[in-house]
Image: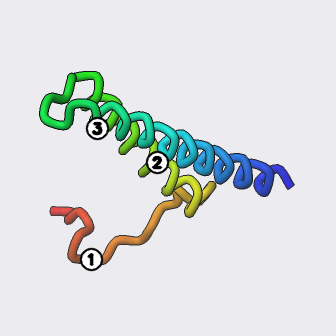
Amino acid sequence: MQRLTGDILLRLAGAALLALAYTGFGVLRGLTLRDPVHMDVEQWALGAFLFLSMTGGIALLILGRHLRDRIPLSARWARRRD
């Protein structure tokens, strides 16, 4: 039960990050429509933060607690023991 609760909370956190990014992109769009040629450092930083929150939110929403699961590597990419 505790794992299920943790998984649901991680997925809800991902949905919250996506909602934050959605509203933030509306704010950023409003800021850039005023003067589309000249963007401030704050606008670039806001865009980078929104991109990171969107990609993190997608990852949390889709994978949940399986985000840090180990995956097997093929022999081609595994470290060689010389």
- The residue carrying pointer 1 sits among few (fewer than 14), some (14 to 19) or many (20 or more) residues within 10 Å by Cα, namely few
Dot 3 or dot 1: first in sequence order is 3
Q: How many marks?
A: 3
Give the quarter of the image for residue 73. bottom left
Identify which residue is drawn at 57% across, 45% down.
19
Q: Amino acid at mark 3?
A: Leu
Report the residue marked by disc 2.
Answer: 56
Where residue 14 sits: x, y (%)? Answer: 58, 49
Report the residue marked by disc 1.
Answer: 75
14 or 73: which is nearer to us?
Answer: 14
9 or 70: which is nearer to us?
Answer: 9
Q: CA distance from mark 3 to mark 1?
A: 51 Å
Identify which residue is drawn at 55% across, 43% down.
17
Helix, strand or loop status at disc 3: helix
Looking at the image, residue 71 sits to the left or right of residue 40; the answer is right
- Using the image, determine if residue 25 lies above or below residue 41: below
Report the residue marked by disc 3.
Answer: 33
Give the quarter of the image for residue 30. top left
Q: CA distance from mark 3 to mark 2?
A: 27 Å
20 or 76: which is nearer to us?
Answer: 20
Quadrant in the picture for the N terminus = bottom right
Identify which residue is drawn at 79% across, 51% down.
5
80 or 60: which is nearer to us?
Answer: 60
Q: Which numbered mark, 3 or 2, is in the foreground of this view?
A: 3
Confirm or deny contact between disc 3 and disc 1 (CB under 8 A): no
Looking at the image, residue 29 sits to the left or right of residue 61; the answer is left
Helix, strand or loop status at disc 1: loop
